[in-house]
Image (tube, helix red, strand yellow):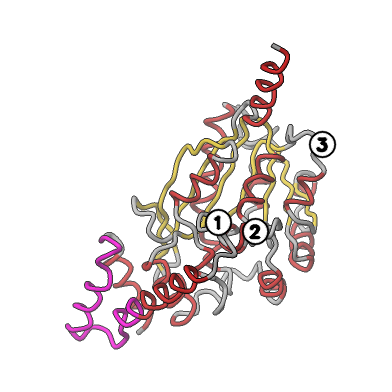
Amino acid sequence: MYVNKFGRLMFGLYSRNTAAVCGVVQAQRAGGRSGFSWTAVCRQRTLWLRRSASLESQHHTVPCHMSARSASHSTVDPDEVRKFQSLASKWWDERGEFAALHAMNDLRVPFIRDNLLNEHRLGHPGKPLAGLRILDVGCGGGLLTEPLGRLGADVLGIDPVGDSIGTAQVHTAFDPDLRQRVSYRACTLEDLSEEEEHGGGRYDAVVASEVVEHLADLETFAFCCGHVLKPGGSLFITTLNKTNLSYALAIVAAEQLLRIVPSGTHDWEKFISPVDLERLLESNGFSVQSIQGMLYNPVSGAWSWTNSTAINYALHAVKAREDPHTEQAEESTADTHS
């Protein structure tokens, strides 16, 4: 019953304006097609947000242009680590908690491949990404790391959850071809960034798929991505928008009703809009090339591209070929000497 209801909600409401969602769902409920009040969910969420805003206005410990997570200087949230520690053995169960991530490969692998081919004009039949070095941040059990390795890229997957890295290593060991190109490390992005002496970068691309909504500090994340990337390197992100619709579908429906993902997997406060993410990346020397909405169908278990970014979206950005901070320093030095 819930699956059918959710399917109708996805395809009946998704294309409409987010601000009108509550009214539309209320009309559906009045028609007797649902026993669950989505209007109540929206109303409750709105009241909660107002209370949160009121509390923020009374406490000035963090400036309004900063989130609490951007003050930590570490991308790792201990609560998130504990959460994924308990799921570390389940990464390769295609019908389990990570089924939606397995299915997402049908979109995100071609998205990464095609954009990299446009940037680098490579010509390796059968291994189109051969010669490229890719960093998979928050790789988990290697669900995306392995397909990128099969495309010919040299891929390093990193994750702070050691047991997830162990699962990834065991799974990769069964494929002799992958052992030559795919490796894993239990570490954080900032750990890896510290190994880069001058920020010239070793990687042609950094991938962070379904990761940023679990991080403690996006400022540190963006800085470190730029630090490990080569000039002109690509950054690929898939994540969730911060809208009432994403709360209703990604948390209430997907976690609490349909159990598509474990309850508590997501924290809506960590979701980020495409506009805010683009602003963050541009302030760290990136140029956003494309943003594309994604839609999950819980009935078929498949993902598809959509024009709306109201729930899930994919982003491709490119690091500036010249470090803007270096350029500013050089200009200041030149002005001093003149």
Q: Which residues are magenta?
A: 16-43
Return the residue found at the far top: 338
State the residue position of label 2: 71
Q: Residue 10: image x %, image y %?
A: 33, 68
Q: Nearer the viewer, residue 82 or 283?
A: 283
Return the residue found at the far bottom: 35
Tell me which residue sits at (55%, 62%) in the image: 101
**Which amino acid does the dot numbered 1 rest on?**
Met
Q: Residue 255: image x %, image y %?
A: 49, 77
The secondary structure type at the circle numbered 1 is loop
State the residue position of label 3: 197
Q: Is residue 259 left or right of residue 142?
A: left
Do callouts 1 and 2 mark residues in contact (Cβ within 8 Å)?
A: yes
Q: Nearer the viewer, residue 84 or 114?
A: 84
Whichever of labels 3 and 1 marks the residue nearer the N terminus, that label is 1
> Residue 66 got which mark?
1
Do callouts 2 and 3 mark residues in contact (Cβ within 8 Å)?
A: no
Q: Residue 226: image x %, image y %?
A: 66, 40
Up/down of 317 relative to 213, above or below: above
Q: Is residue 120 left or right of residue 334?
A: left
Quadrant of the rendered structure where residue 126 is?
Answer: top right
Crowding at mark 2 (Cα within 10 Å: few <14, some 14-19, many 20+): some
Do callouts 3 and 1 mark residues in contact (Cβ within 8 Å)?
A: no
